[in-house]
Amino acid sequence: MKVDFGKTAQDYRQHRAGFPEAFFARAAAMGVGLASQQMLDIGTGTGSLARGFALRGAQVTGLDPAAPLLEQARSMDAQADVQIAYHEGKAEALPFGEGSFDVVSAGQCWHWFDRAKAAQEAFRVLRRGGIMAIAHFDWVPLSGNVVEATEQLILQHNPSWQGAGGTGIHATHFADLAQAGFVELESFSFDVPVSYSHEAWRGLIRASAGVAASLSPAAVAVFDQELAALLARDFHDDPLCIPHRVSMVYARKY
C-alpha cells in the first residue's frame, strides 16, 4: 500500500492529538527529553513529539520525508514559541555525522521505516551513552467500541490497510534495537482516554494511513460520509471517549 502523509497534512495538524503530558514526565524519568539534551526526532511529522521535548528545554532537530508535514510543524512551533531545526530526509539515511546527538526519538512512525537500517543509523548518530527511544500513542480497538467499528469500515474501503487490530504494544522493537547494538533495553506503557468530537474523530481517521494517505480524494469523501453515518447511527455520545495506549521502548548506546 503506497502511503503519502503529505496529503493529510491539514487534518493531521488539526485533529491528531499529541502525546499526553504524562508521557513526557515518564520519558524524563528515563533520561529522555531533558533540558539541554541534543535530540533528533525522526519521522517527526507535524513535530508533535519534537515540540513536546523542546518545550521542556531540549535542543531538538526534526526529520521527515514529507515537506507538507514539516510546513505544518513550523507553523505550530511558531504558535508554541519554540525553535526546532527541521530537515527533509529519511530515517534510513540520516544527514548527520557520527555522535551528533544525545537522544534519537521516533514517535508513531517506526513501522514505516526499514527498521534495521533506521536502527543502525540512529546508533551511528548517537554519542556514547546516548539513548534511542521509540514511542507510540495508539488508539485501542475493543469489542464493540467505536475504534473497532471504524477499523472495519476502513478495511471495507481499503482492504490492503494493515493497521487494524493493534494492541499498542510493539514487541518487535526490542529485537530491532538489540540487533543494532543497543543495550539496557527497557519499556513502559500506560492507558489514557482521549475525547474526540464526531467531527474530530472523522478528521483523525481521514488523516490516517488507510484513508487520505492512500485513497483518492473521491474515495476519501465517500468513506467520510459513511463514517459520519456510522457515528450518528451507532455511537451517539459526542464527544466520544477513545481508549489509547502510550508506550515507549528505549535503549542505550555503549
Image (cartoon, rainbow, N blue to C red):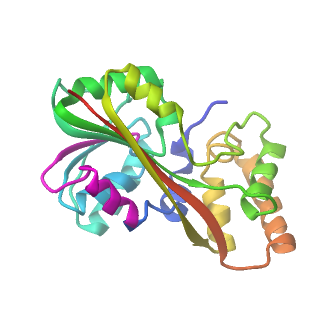
**Residue 244 % position (x, y):** 58, 60
Residue at left 76%, top 55%?
A: 148
| Quadrant of the image containing the N terminus | top right
Image quadrant assignment for residue 169:
top right
Inspect the magenta stretch and tell me whether residue 198 lies in it: no
Task: Report if residue 225 is visible in the image.
Answer: yes
Q: Furthest residue to the right?
A: 233
Residue at left 24%, top 63%?
A: 55
Judged left or right of residue 207, residue 211 is right
Inspect the magenta stretch and tell me whether residue 25 lies in it: yes
**Residue 164 % position (x, y):** 71, 44
Image quadrant assignment for residue 133:
top left
Q: Which one is nearer the viewer's eye here, 108 or 87?
A: 108
**Residue 69 % position (x, y):** 43, 48
Q: Which one is nearer the viewer's eye here, 249 or 138?
A: 249
In the image, residue 35 sits, relative to residue 38, either above or below, namely below
Give the total number of marks visible in the rendering.
0
Task: Report if residue 112 is visible in the image.
Answer: no
In the image, residue 164 sits, relative to residue 17, either above or below, namely above
**Residue 147 % position (x, y):** 72, 59
| Quadrant of the image containing the C terminus | top left
In the image, residue 135 sits, relative to residue 241, either above or below, namely above
Judged left or right of residue 208, residue 233 is right
Judged left or right of residue 66, residue 184 is left
Find the magenta span and give its range. Answer: 22-43
Residue at left 62%, top 64%?
A: 243
Q: Which one is nearer the viewer's eye here, 138 or 82?
A: 138
Residue at left 63%, top 48%?
A: 167
